[in-house]
Image: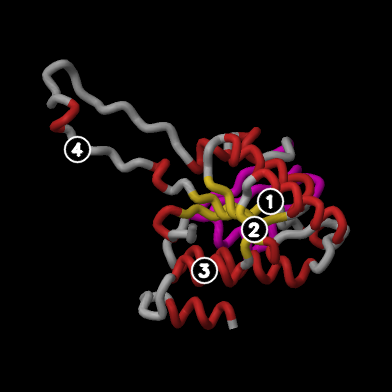
Amino acid sequence: MLLDSAQSQLVLVDYQSRLMSAIFEAPLVLANAVRLGQLARLMQVPVWGTEQNPSKLGENAAEIKASCDKTMSKMQFSGVEEGLGEWLRPPVKPVAGNARSLPKHLQKPQADAAQRNSIVVAGCEAHVCLLQTALDLLEDEFEVWVVTDACSSRTERNRDAAFDRLAAAGVELVTTEMVAFEWLRSAEHPAFKAAQALIK
């Protein structure tokens, strides 16, 4: 199963200034997260951000915030507990009308937000906020893809334990380049050269 940009959304979890200073391999992780956000923008993939207790941990890095359509401040470790699922799959609005409206089979189908059911997630800390968000998204019947080289924790051991647990739960583990080339699918994609420049 490959990622499809038309079915994808990107969630960037807690790349906050005071947190990143303590994160294992932080510069590489942040660079890959920024790259993911830029790739998503190139390919018209919606991007959402979360910030854990920003009054204490600061806001997300400016480059991350710039890629996000919207950023959620949260106190729960899982963004889903704070309403992230509703951002990713907004409730379908009821069809307006009355008894004289067209029968259902003649009405135009509404755009279905649930069509973007593949959620690509990256963030910090991998064993806390990222893990809990990803597992809750899985429970809410999203397909979840975690970008390993754009995730970390304060220790390598905690990061790796998170990846083990996520894989066992059925989350797809991928890298930034895997996401990029699966979203592109072809060297003939209109965004190929721009995406290639970001990856190099």
Which amino acid, by three-letter code, is at mark 1? Ala
Mark 3 or mark 4, earlier in chain = 3
Q: Is residue 164 magenta?
A: no
Q: Which residue has dot 4 on it?
A: 108
x%, y% of residue 53?
75, 43
Identify the secondary structure beneath mark 1: helix
Identify the secondary structure beneath mark 2: strand
Mark 2 or mark 1, earlier in chain = 1
Q: CA distance from mark 2 to mark 1?
A: 7 Å
What's drawn in magenta, residue-wise? 46-75
Which amino acid, by three-letter code, is at mark 2? Leu
Q: Which mark is residue 167?
A: 1
Which amino acid, by three-letter code, is at mark 3? Leu
Q: Which mark is residue 39?
A: 3
The residue at the point 50 percent across, 63 percent down is 40
Q: Which residue has dot 2 on it?
A: 173
Whether pointer 4 and pointer 2 mark residues with C-beta atoms closer than 8 Å, the reply is no
Relative to residue 31, is residue 38 drawn left or right? left
Classify 144 as above or below 109: below
Task: Point out the frontmost of discs 4 and 2.
Answer: 2
Whether pointer 3 and pointer 2 mark residues with C-beta atoms closer than 8 Å, the reply is no
